[in-house]
Image (cartoon, helix red, strand yellow):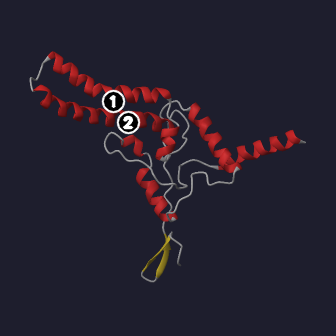
Amino acid sequence: MPGASNLYTMGDVQRQRPYVPARTLDTEFPLIDSDPHFRRVLRYARREDYAVGAATAAAGPSLMLLWERIAPSYVGKGGFAPIMRLAGVIGITAGFLQFYSRSIFRFYGFSENQREREMDMREMVDKVKRNEPLYGKSTLSPYMQGVASRNSRYAGVWLHIIPWFNFVNHEQHGVDTAKYYQQAERELEAERTKTL
């Protein structure tokens, strides 16, 4: 069937690709999203995430300066500058990964996430009211969206091994989206009764 991306043909038999649901982990706090979009993780970050990221980024170059004062290398300005640039790049990378992992762990429910749950509910209910797709529009086929989701689901757990981010809009986030529609209905009903 043309356009049906979840079907494939094997010999003379046409089969449907299996749907692989998101695995739910037993966490102390509720799951918000098992595969949040990169921009969403950045938008939901807290001030302390920025502070920890900045401190982590500054730690590398600061330690290099401290070590140079304690035990001078005597390489001069020409030799020390490339080392400081490298320490700066490594520090900035480590700071960003630390900042990002703190934010994404709240989506997974690994740390306290009350603020993020409220932001998530507000954002999604507003999208329901505007009749927009909850997780954005995608130009990919449903099958390719599933592939992207399976490749980046819970990828933040392994951020220190392989930095892997979700840049794809898809509908597979490991949460029941009915709660957003129910809340939107309650709010719309409250608005209707208020105007009467």
Of residues 89 and 170, the one drawn nearer to the viewer in this rendering: 89
Q: Which amino acid does label 1 sit on?
A: Ala
116 above or below 52?
A: below
Residue 32 horizontal/vertical position (percent): 55, 41
Residue 16 horizontal/vertical position (percent): 50, 70
157 above or below 22?
A: above
Q: How far apart are marks 1 and 2 (CA)?
A: 8 Å
For residue 175, say whether it is visible.
yes
Of residues 12 and 138, the one drawn nearer to the viewer in this rendering: 138
Residue 195 horizontal/vertical position (percent): 87, 41
Q: Name the residue under label 2.
A: 96
Q: Mark 1 points at which residue?
A: 57
Picture residue at 60% right of the left edge, 37% below the top? 119
The reply to whether discs 1 and 2 touch (Cβ–Cβ < 8 Å) is yes
For residue 179, say whether it is visible.
no
Q: Seen in the image, is 132 located left or right of residue 142?
A: right
Q: Which quarter of the rendered picture does the C terminus lie within?
A: top right
Q: What element carries label 2?
A: helix
Q: What element carries label 1?
A: helix
* Mark 1 vs 2, N-terminal side: 1
The 10 Å Cα crowd at callout 1, few under 14, some 14 to 19, many 20 or more, is: many
Q: In which quarter of the image is residue 97?
A: top left
Q: What residue type is labelled 2?
A: Phe
Picture residue at 45% right of the left edge, 30% below the top? 49
